[in-house]
Image: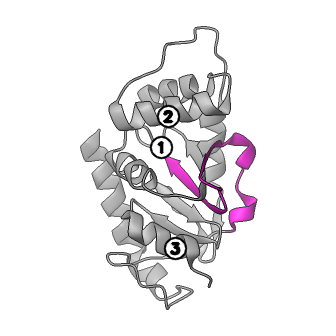
Amino acid sequence: MIIKCIKLFFTLALLFLGQVQAQITPASVDVPGWDSREMLDFSTLPFELSIKEIKGDGSRQLALFGDPNCPYTKQAVEQLSELTDVTIHVFPAAFIGGQKSESQVQQVFCRSTNEERVAAWKSLVLQGEESEVITDCRANNGEKIRASFGQLRSSVGLYRNIAPTLIFSNDLAHPGPLPADDIEFLLDYQP
């Protein structure tokens, strides 16, 4: 599965690198290792489906679309844990992990409070620990998230499906994880 995630990440990056790079705005953003940028309208994300983690005063915002079984999602969550004064809207779904991820995401959404969902998500992604199974759970937010993610339109056309994807409140989007310093820069960047 890790190989599948890596192949998907690099295949999509190579396919879109040339096309996206020539159409990028804003051109002045300089994040090492970031060769493609797209603008996505942050305000149009399906926030009602997200798990919301508020850190500090929560004044800055970003969204994370990720699969609990993708090692790149784990890297992104590790880096996000270093941030302060941010609201993180997590959109967990089975982007690469198939039925295993689907079941795990369903169990995360079966938790009764947002705080329990945040704890279950982080425990699953960071430690690989699954929550106690709720047998009568019928949550299907993961399916809805995956479907809505597949319909996102960027400044250069239909957005490519890749997990993880970070989307910032300034409408910048980045496929894949970033170091915490680069995330801080993009959170504060004003195009």
Spatial CA distance of label 1 from label 2 is 15 Å
Q: Position of residue 68 (x, y in %)?
A: 43, 37
- Quadrant occupied by the C terminus: bottom right
The magenta span reads 41-66
Three-letter code for the amino acid on which mark 3 is drawn: Leu
Whether residue 64 sits left or right of residue 175 in the image: it is right
Q: Position of residue 135 (x, y in %)?
A: 58, 8
Q: Please, what secondary structure does the residue beneath circle 1 have?
A: loop
- Quadrant occupied by the N terminus: top left
**Circles 3 and 2: CB atoms closer than 8 Å:** no
Tell me, yes or no, whether the highlighted magenta stretch contains residue 63: yes
Q: Residues within 10 Å of mark 3 (few under 14, many from 20)?
A: many
Q: Please, what secondary structure does the residue beneath circle 2 have?
A: helix
Which residue is depicted at the point 48% across and 26% down?
A: 104
Which residue is depicted at the point 53% across and 39% down?
A: 93
> Which circle marks residue 121 in the picture?
2
| Mark 3, residue position | 186
Tell me, yes or no, whether the highlighted magenta stretch contains residue 76: no
Q: Residues within 10 Å of mark 1 (few under 14, many from 20)?
A: many
| Mark 1, residue position | 95
